Image (tube, grey):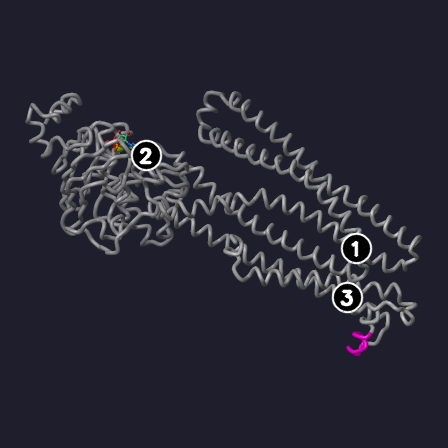
Amino acid sequence: MVFYGYFGKWLYVLCFLLLFGAMCDSFGIMMLLPILNFNKLEDSNNYYTEILCKTLESLGLGVSLTSLLFVIFIIFSLKGCFMFLQKGFLAYILCGFEKRIKIDFCHKYESMKYGYFVDTKIGYLNNIVTTEIARAMNCLNTYVEVLANIIFVTIYILAAFFINFKLTVIVLFVCSLLFVAMKSLARISKNMSVLISENNAETQSVLLQIIGNFKYLKATNSFKRIFDQLFVIIESGRKYNFKGRVLVAIPLSIIDPISVLLLSGLIYYNVEYKGESLSSVLILSLIFYRLFSRVFSFQAFWQKFNSLVGGIEVLRKATKVFDIQKEHTGKLKIEKFEKIIELKGISFSFSSKQVLSDINMTIPKNKSIGIVGESGAGKTTLFDIFTGLLVPQSGTVCIDGIDYREIDISAIRNLIGYVTQDAIIFNDSFANNITLWKCNFNDYRCREKIENASIMANCDTFIKETSMGYETEVGDRGIRVSGGQKQRISIAREIYRNPDIMIFDEATSALDSESEDFVQKSINAMKGQRTVVIIAHRLSTVKKCDYIYVLKNGRIVEEGNFQELCSNTNSHFFRMCEAQNLQN
Ligand SMILES: Nc1ncnc2c1ncn2[C@@H]1O[C@H](COP(=O)(O)OP(=O)(O)O)[C@@H](O)[C@H]1O
Ligand SMILES: [Mg+2]
């Protein structure tokens, strides 16, 4: 059922191609019979040979060695064509699937609720696209191989019945005994394959930790301890792999001796005791031989199929969950931010933990708003509500009087620029980090825009000092630039995007005072020209804001401008000022 869902009616096409292939194969082998008997073809009383001769004559080919050989050649060529078509067709379907499913999942990630993302392991999301999809495709491929084997086996059995009924029954009986014997072997190797994939996962998880903490491990020469752990896992991986491979080798090596033994017995019995013609037993043997290898490979593929079917299951579950966890969004598209953003009576909690309570706040266009509060007060959560990443349990957020719930949420996000404490850096050049691949640095208009943004963000000078200027690569997570420089690049990126609203969430708190000065200057330069929201626990950062909200334990406890708040000696803000040695 599931597979039909994937393949649809194409499954029939594949089956037909396989069926034709199998028929050509058996028919081709059966054609060898008249050739082996060619000398006594005239007086042969085999009805099969008779039909064949008649068919050849009616085709105007005449019964001769050449015509028989020619027909055999044509039949096997046809078989080749069918098999090639089937493989090519399957490849075409599967590659198309894989692409579609990958893109599909990327979009699912895009539209996933932020709250769900926070609760989900990154490894899981990564694994789906990098591993599980490939596993599922491999499974579909194996499924078709299993089908192919079933079809071939059926056709071979029919052909064998056609040649010699009684003998076929005996062989099939022996064959099924063999099949049962192989099954227990298959069970052992299935267990082994589970152990191998668990071992892979363990190896990967330790490796990821090593790569993630590479600098620390190297600087403190601590590789050895974590390697001890890793090498134990690698060693058990070696054992499982070795056993797995030996198990696979057993059926592969015994198939020939066992089949030959069986067939020799057959030939001996039939020719010596029954006095049947050698040729028909030989052809029958050939068909049985092929039958045996198909039965064996059916076993192998069935086993592989079982080990891969998990991939399909993972995709099915993930699809279901992601569809449930899809972000709800309105239809209304807004282009610009005109007047005001209002938060009215916002409350938010993470499961049982109340983080924001009854927040009322207004952000007028082109004003600068400061939000201060100690760490854990709920500032970042408030930001997540601005951007629609989190949806408050009660209260409304309106932009120019329109409720967020009615607006296409991505349109709101287009209006927002965002700089966080951890600078967002991509492993690419400075230019691409600033434009997010929107334009080509070699184009002079693009260059001009990038440079202007960088000058405003105070990062132009140090970028130009690097070996390749704007085209210098910054390394993974910006490993080749300092914290303050990364932060200024993030700001340059937002300036380049030119959004209506800029939000700085603790943008300077991880910086030394010199870098902070630089960043502060770029923030100050924006004031009056765009709407700026500055979230900070350090009060110096919000000193120049037009209006300040003080957040404490998820509530707004005070609001006003810096002068007002600071002059009230009873205020929480005043005490914060004192604690941070800030006076007006
Ligand atoms: N995903 C989450 N699940 C549960 N609690 C969370 C989650 N994210 C944040 N919190 C809690 O919400 C509170 C406010 O967090 P946050 O808004 O990040 O504070 P701030 O930015 O002011 O330091 C903190 O007490 C934090 O522990
Ligand atoms: Mg925060």
Question: What secondary structure is marked by label 2?
Answer: loop
- Mark 3, residue position: 73
- Mark 1, residue position: 168
Question: Residue 422: which disc?
Answer: 2
Whole-percent x, y for residue 391 in the image:
25, 42
Whole-percent x, y for residue 118 in the image:
35, 37
Question: What secondary structure is marked by label 1?
Answer: helix
Whole-percent x, y for residue 128 in the image:
47, 43
Q: Give, as a three-letter code, the residue at label 1.
A: Thr
Q: Is residue 364 magenta?
A: no
Evaluate whether residue 345 shows in this view. yes
Give whichever of 399, 72 is nearer the camera.
72
Quadrant containing the C terminus is: top left
What secondary structure predominates along the stretch shown in magenta? helix
- Looking at the image, which residue is at 16% across and 21% down? 579
Give whichever of 564, 190 is nearer the camera.
190
Q: Give, as a three-letter code, the residue at label 2.
A: Asp
Pointer 3 local density, CA inside 10 Å: few below 14, some 14–19, many at least 20: few
Q: Is residue 51 above or below residue 157?
A: below
Which stretch is magenta?
A: 54-61
Pointer 2 local density, CA inside 10 Å: few below 14, some 14–19, many at least 20: some
Distance from the alpha carbon under mark 2 to that under mark 3? 70 Å
Give whichever of 155, 80 is nearer the camera.
155
Q: Left or right? Give the position of 111 relative to 54.
A: left
Question: Do the CB atoms of the residues marked 2 and 3 lie less than 8 Å apart?
Answer: no
